[in-house]
Image (cartoon, grey):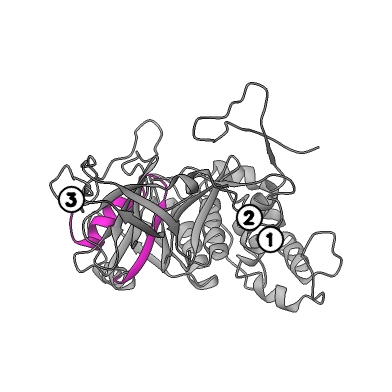
Amino acid sequence: MQTGIISRIYGAYYNLRPLPDLTEEISGQLRGRLRLESRSAPKKKSAGKSWNGGETMRERHLLIVGDHVRYSASDAAGRVQSKSGSGSKAPGKIKSGGTITIHSLEHRRNAVYRSTAGELHALGSNLDRAVVLMSLNQPRPRWGFLDRFLASCHAGGVPAQIVFTKPDLVEETERADLERMIALYRDGLGYPVTILDLLRQEPAGELDALVQAVASGVTLLAGHSGTGKSTLTNLLLGDKSVQKTGSISESSGKGRHTTTNSRLIMSDDRRMFLIDTPGVKEWGVQHLSPEEILESFPEIEPATRECRFGDCTHQPEQDGCAVHDLLDRSRDLYAEYFENFDAIESDPNVAVPPHSEECVHPERLRSLQAMLDSLEYNLKIRTGDFIKATGRARNGRIKPA
């Protein structure tokens, strides 16, 4: 029995690299007993409870990229043959002649999840950090997406960093607002923030600092399509041919997919490991509880400590809760901003208000409320829906009565 790390997933096949040497990839399948096991995944902080008040979330895959597994190999087991001639550069066909059987999953230290249609989709596990790329233009930044990513990282026990790309494309009319938002996450909330023009590879100091930050360990790269994940991967590894890069769609203004599934890539010295993930449009957080979402907001944490109820769940109906006193005070402070939000959406010249240390910023309030509201939706199979061969259901979403 040997140990390996999952490097890529193709349906029922799992590519892995043997530990500790991390030689070229081999491909195997799960032992039959593992394929038949339930893939239910209870939330970390509410183990034993059903998800979202009645529904059970299931993992899309039993194993995920970054997992450590135990496997056995028959004689003449084949390796993954790359189209480029190198086992580390590009996926290729499986060379026949042997059998790799994955028997068990080793302890999973942590993982970053998102949820869609009643499923848990894990993008990577056993991570030292997770980096989200946010384009400042083409595509435009979506702060709610960023906040959901940060909440999922916090719940998964993974330190998060933010990289803002395409600063050269920012319109002058929007620059002040974007600078306020960047300062909010960097100075107000304390997240490590890097601003990079990836095509020009500048400022060089920022790029060098990021390279040093991810020089060892396992780093997850996430973000929308078109934000520069593949370009950054190539820069970090010092090889422009590792990942294909794409362009922005002229019709939608959004990025085109160049990465189709999560992939573990390593540097030549086998110290830096990057998990490059496909671009995602939405980041659901229905796998989190309200308490986990509130705990993921660092600006709320002081109020959590000050709450006079030791076992408070910080629900709106709890009179005297310090957390909800803070949220109410924040809504009152930014009431005018919320009242004029429709105008703000249509007029980019309307300024985003500065952050007040005594309150939660209005954009963060919007994200928090949207996340909590999303937990009020249950998933239900409708007439005409079906179960696919993979065991996944096509679901509709309805709000409970």
Q: Nearer the viewer, residue 21 or 206?
A: 21
Mark 1 secondary-structure assignment: helix
| Quarter of the image where the N terminus is located | bottom left
Mark 2 secondary-structure assignment: loop
Give the residue drawn at x 59%, y 67%: 355
Cβ–Cβ under 8 Å for marks 3 and 2: no
Tell me the residue that label 2 is attached to: 42
| Residue 175 visible within the image | no
Answer above or below: position of 237 versus 93: below
Give the Cα distance between marks 1 and 2: 7 Å
- Residue sitting at the far top: 384
The reply, left or right, for residue 382 in relation to residue 138 is right
Give the Cα distance between marks 3 and 1: 44 Å
- Residue sitting at the far left: 85
Answer above or below: position of 223 versus 356: above
Tell me the residue that label 3 is attached to: 241
Few, some or many C-alpha atoms within 10 Å of disc 2 (few <14, some 14-19, many ≥20)? some
- Give the amino acid type for the residue marked by disc 3 in the picture: Ser
Percent from the top left, x then y, of residue 128? 41, 69
Q: Nearer the viewer, residue 39 or 51?
A: 39
Tell me the residue that label 1 is attached to: 46
Percent from the top left, x then y, of residue 50? 70, 51
Label 3 or label 1, whichever comes before in sequence order: 1
The reply, left or right, for residue 336 in relation to residue 320 is left
- Give the amino acid type for the residue marked by disc 2 in the picture: Pro
Chain part drawn in magenta: 215-241
